[in-house]
């Protein structure tokens, strides 16, 4: 994607939380139909509205707040992470390269939102300490060593690598954690944030329509564009990409989280996120995911069940009981935890692809006959799906790229498939000092910290 390197968003410059668009749409402004009412669709719509586009959002359902099943975007753990994340599925080269850029765009925007007390309360976004634990010294796992060095140089705030974090967080000695680091990360109350995002895009002028679209979007593109008076269609539908994008590589990974009361009465109140990621233990069945949702709710996870399509889990499901036991063995205080009586278990289907996260224009072209000649007409569909369990972490980064692709599509430029970006020779190096030297310094600091 040649445009993506220039498509980063900045809060206040490109986006504002005010109830009016940063750039007012004109009657002649391009019209965009966004299909999908989850976090990807709403943040994409917000970005387009502030760019001066006219936006309609179409979704089969919206965020709800009762005791029934909620949207996948609400079920998400919504702890910002540097990829590969807890679930550890986005490991192909294209996804990793783009996701590392996307997540940092989102990091800085969520951080800016959390910096305002009023916005933090409205949006449910807070910056909290995120602690990551490892069963061996980080230097002994080159994959984790490389990831840590990238995180250190990425621009996150509050990085600290120190094995003493294990004791500070009361992690069980018997669990086997021997190394740790932490940094500040956005932690999002998804129920509150989805309510805020939905209201915000409506205030900025988006039209919301409840409707289910069936079938391949490409086959009905002109019909939909005519019906909704749209110049561009954006597919932000998650798992529905299987049908709407005719993409057989889409598949679900079922996840489940227990919600427990975190008011300090049953165990010391937790204000940090505590995780052991799949890539750290090289086993997606051994994830530990403990994240404060808001002032009074703590999430306990996690599980990853590929190709499970049914939301049939309950608190007594064997995999949920194993998950809880694993987290209690890790943090013994949780054995006294009380389930949230209103919504004890949250479950959802993470929308993954067998290939990379897809932020890309439709590659198929229409055929048009004119004067006896058959011409190829580029589609004006832009896709943004397959984010899996990282929708909140990648949100604004993906939206920035979507805007760039929309501009390409409006000019009917030929679409190009996603690929590894070629970084210009003049671009700054990832690390300011050689990796080997930094690794040596880290090892030295680890030894000094134990003295």
Image (cartoon, rainbow, N blue to C red):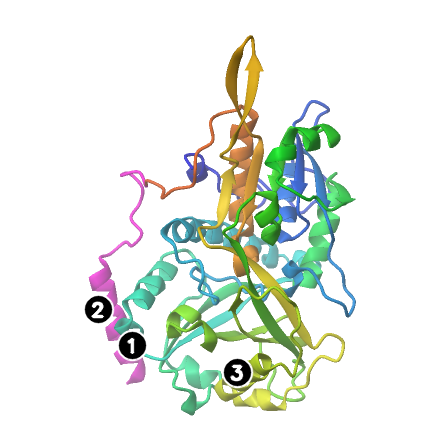
Q: Are marks 1 and 3 in contact (CB under 8 Å)?
A: no
Q: Which residues are magenta?
A: 423-451
In this view, 404 is above or below 164: above
Q: Which residue position is annotated with label 2?
A: 440
Indicate the position of residue 448 as horizontal and vertical percent values: 27, 79
Tell me the quarter of the image containing the C terminus.
Answer: bottom left
* Mark before the other along the chain sequence, 3 or 2: 3
Residue 327's disc is: 3
**Residue 446 numbered mark, or none:** 1
Residue 274 magenta-drawn? no
| Mark 1 → mark 3, Cα distance in angstroms | 27 Å
Q: Nearer the viewer, residue 64 or 446?
A: 64
Q: Earlier in the sequence, mark 1 or mark 3?
A: 3
Please tell me the numbered disc located at residue 92.
none
User: Mark 3 near mark 2, Cβ–Cβ under 8 Å?
Assistant: no
Q: Secondary structure at mark 2?
A: helix
Q: What's the residue at 35%, 82% (across, down)?
A: 178
Q: In the image, 282: left or right of 406?
A: left
User: Whole-percent x and y of residue 257?
Assistant: 61, 73
Report, in whole angstroms, how far the alpha carbon at label 1 lies from the one at label 2.
10 Å
Q: Residue at x 54, y 61 (%)?
A: 389
- Residue 168: percent from the left, percent from the top? 46, 84
Q: Residue at x 68, y 44 (%)?
A: 214
Q: Secondary structure at mark 1?
A: helix
Q: Nearer the viewer, mark 1 or mark 3?
A: 3
Say which of 209 and 161 sits in front. 209
Disc on the earlier residue, 1 or 2: 2
* Residue 138 appears in view: yes
């Amino acid at each position: 994607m040649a445009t993506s390197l220039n498509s980063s968003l900045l809060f206040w410059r490109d986006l504002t939380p005010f109830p009016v668009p940063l750039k007012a749409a004109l009657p002649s402004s391009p019209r965009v139909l966004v299909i999908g009412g989850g976090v990807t669709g709403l943040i994409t719509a917000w970005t387009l509205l502030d760019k001066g586009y006219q936006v309609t959002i179409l979704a089969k359902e919206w965020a709800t707040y009762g005791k029934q099943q909620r949207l996948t975007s609400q079920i998400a753990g919504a702890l910002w992470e540097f990829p590969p994340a807890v679930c550890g599925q986005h490991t192909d080269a294209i996804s990793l390269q783009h996701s590392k850029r996307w997540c940092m765009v989102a990091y800085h925007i969520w951080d800016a939102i959390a910096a305002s007390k009023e916005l933090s309360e409205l949006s449910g976004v807070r910056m909290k300490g995120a602690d990551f634990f490892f069963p061996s010294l980080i230097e002994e796992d080159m994959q984790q060593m490389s990831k840590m060095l990238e995180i250190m140089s990425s621009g996150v705030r509050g990085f600290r690598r120190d094995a003493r974090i294990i004791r500070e967080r009361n992690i069980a000695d018997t669990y086997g954690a021997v190394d740790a680091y932490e940094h500040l990360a956005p932690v999002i109350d998804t129920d509150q944030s989805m309510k805020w995002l939905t209201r915000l895009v409506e205030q900025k002028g988006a039209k919301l329509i409840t409707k289910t679209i069936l079938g391949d979007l490409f086959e009905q593109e002109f019909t939909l564009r005519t019906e909704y008076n749209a110049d561009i269609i954006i597919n932000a539908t998650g798992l529905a990409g299987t049908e709407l994008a005719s993409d057989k590589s889409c598949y679900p990974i079922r996840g489940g989280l227990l919600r427990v009361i975190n008011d300090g009465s049953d165990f010391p109140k937790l204000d940090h996120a505590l995780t052991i990621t799949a890539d750290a233990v090289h086993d997606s069945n051994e994830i530990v995911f403990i994240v404060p949702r808001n002032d009074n709710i703590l999430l306990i996870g996690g599980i990853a069940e590929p190709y499970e399509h049914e939301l049939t889990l309950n608190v007594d499901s064997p995999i949920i009981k194993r998950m809880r036991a694993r987290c209690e063995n890790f943090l013994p205080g949780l054995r006294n935890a009380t389930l949230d009586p209103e919504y004890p278990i949250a479950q959802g289907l993470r929308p993954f692809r067998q290939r990379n996260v897809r932020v890309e224009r439709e590659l198929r072209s229409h055929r048009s006959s004119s004067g006896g000649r058959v011409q190829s007409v580029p589609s004006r569909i832009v896709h943004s799906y397959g984010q899996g369990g990282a929708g909140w972490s990648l949100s604004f980064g993906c939206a920035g790229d979507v805007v760039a692709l929309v501009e390409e599509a409006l000019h009917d430029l030929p679409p190009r498939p996603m690929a590894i970006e070629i970084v210009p020779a003049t671009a700054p190096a990832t690390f300011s000092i050689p990796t080997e030297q930094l690794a040596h310094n880290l090892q030295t600091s680890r030894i000094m910290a134990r003295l």
